[in-house]
Amino acid sequence: MARTLYDKLWDEHVVHTEEDGTSILYIDRHLVHEVTSPQAFEGLREAGRKLWRISSVVATADHNTPTTHWERGYDGIEDPISKEQITTLDSNIKEFGAAAFFPFLSKRQGIVHVIGPESGATLPGMTVVCGDSHTSTHGAFGALAHGIGTSEVEHVMATQTLLAKKAKNLLVMVDGTLAPGCTAKDIVLAIIGRIGTAGGTGYTIEFAGSAIRDLSIEGRMTVCNMAIEAGARAGLVAVDEKTIAYVKGRPLAPTGVEWDQAVEYWKTLQSDPGAHFDTVVELDAAQIKPQVTWGTSPEMVLPVDGRVPDPDKEKDANKRGAIERALSYMGLEPNKPMNDIFVDKVFIGSCTNSRIEDMREAAAMVKKLGQKVAKNVKLAMVVPGSGQVKEQAEREGLDQIFKAAGFEWREPGCSMCLAMNADRLEPGERCASTSNRNFEGRQGAGGRTHLVSPAMAAAAAVHGHFVDVRQFA
Ligand SMILES: CC(C)[C@H](C(=O)O)[C@@H](O)C(=O)O
Ligand code: SF4
């Protein structure tokens, strides 16, 4: 029978299925960060257990790490809770072990979803879990990647398995060619704008079509990263030559005969022709414009040439109420052109958009505009996703472009994606952000987040307000 990519990955890893569909899935890769692992390690310790398979664990500290003053070492972590989470991870890994650990201050530290693929810890065909919702990112490699909760983290540590029920198959087909200036971020925001934040609930989404195939692996990661914001627990892209080329030579990737065998298998990781999808959604890439969110959910998104919605034009009372609440929180007037929204801060980073291509995209825009950060922008910061990305960007001189224009060039980490470290918005501040969530308070209590692509964020920094980057492409 013809199977989808998801069906294949599921079948390959399912160990046992109960009558009600509850299944036990074998887990190949367990990515660990400091926020969701302390209680899990504690649970193991209390039960006198070890890690079932140490070689499956790859760990890093990212959410709580500061992005300035690394020369001060651990003393530079001002918040005591952040410091404790980071040092607890250090001691847990020392006690329990790991295949690889990239601790705070190490050259290869970074956001878990950046360092996984970068180190070759994420490989096609794997089941990948992490106590983090954006684990869906790794589906870009044709891997079945789920975000899990802390109790599940402990379960995986102790048994190398996860209890799960099979989801339905959703195919999101994006065909056609993107307009110059439009990117993977615009694709995924447009998808969420179309299907909503619950559109993928109960599904695993496979992203396919010529526009997805045309994306780089990094772009595919950006798309899969936000599958969770569309309600799906996992997003997938089929394996192709680009996937295999990306993985080749990475530190944890197989070599020699094992490499050849792996590639043989990876080449089978596509949906079969005629495989059944429960739902299919189609988008024309040529119609996608640069996207900007205006509200407090990623589905509250519009093209940059649009206007802020007018609740009076909404007939559905629930939707009208949601628009009114969002506009009041966001401090926006109905019908205001998106282009006229001025920002106080700009954040280029996060596991959605902090890889080398994102850095290049933002730097290219800054260079093209040839001006400094606008006066009304109090802070424009660029936060590479990992130490490796930072080094590479510096080798290419991207940091110089940013600094010369007045951007701050920071150390890697989650940074202002969420207010768990020193980087945050003050109440009422408005931010153009390349991250993935714009919920109330996400970047700091009272902060107002507009999600955009790296090019759009860079252009907003220079102009002081949103501008349509297609005019500069
Ligand atoms: C802290 C962590 C558990 C959380 C997640 O699960 O995604 C964070 O990474 C986020 O983006 O909100
Ligand atoms: S960068 Fe943001 S979305 Fe990604 S793992 Fe960190 S906090 Fe979560």
Image (cartoon, rainbow, N blue to C red):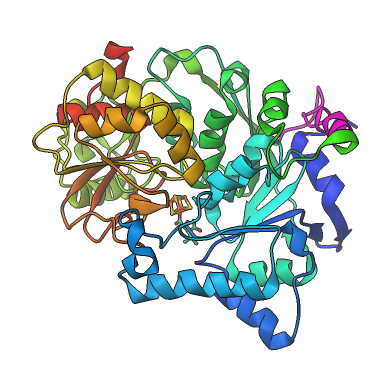
Front one among 28 and 228: 28
Give the image quarter of residue 306. top left
Magenta segment: 259-277
| Left or right side of 247 for 405 | left
Q: Nearer the viewer, residue 295 or 24?
A: 24
Residue 418 sits above or below residue 195 on the image: below
**Residue 369 picture location, percent across and down:** 22, 18
- Comparing 401 with 267, the one in front is 401
Measuring from the top left, give residue 326's x and y in whole percent.
Answer: 25, 48
Q: Choose top left, top right, bottom left or bottom right for residue 373.
A: top left
Is 361 above or below relative to 162?
Answer: above
Q: Quadrant of the N terminus?
A: top right
Q: Quadrant of the C terminus?
A: top left
Q: Position of residue 78 (x, y in %)?
A: 30, 69
Residue 417 forms part of the magenta stretch: no
* Residue at far left of view: 375
Residue located at (54% from left, 54% from top):
133
Is 306 on the left-hand or right-hand side of 452? left
State left or right for residue 441 relative to residue 372.
Answer: right
* Residue 140 image-quadrant placement: top right
Seen at 79% across and 57% down, the residue is 25
Task: Please state if 9 lies on the left or on the right of 278 as rendered.
Answer: right
Residue 266: say if magenta. yes
Asked if 427 appears above or below 214 in the picture, the reply is: below
**Above-or-below relation of 465 to 214:** below
Q: Residue at x 58, y 61 (%)?
A: 131
Q: Position of residue 312 (x, y in %)?
A: 20, 38
Question: Taking the image as drawn, is residue 185 in sight?
Answer: no
In this rendered view, identify the residue nearer to me: 344 or 227. 344
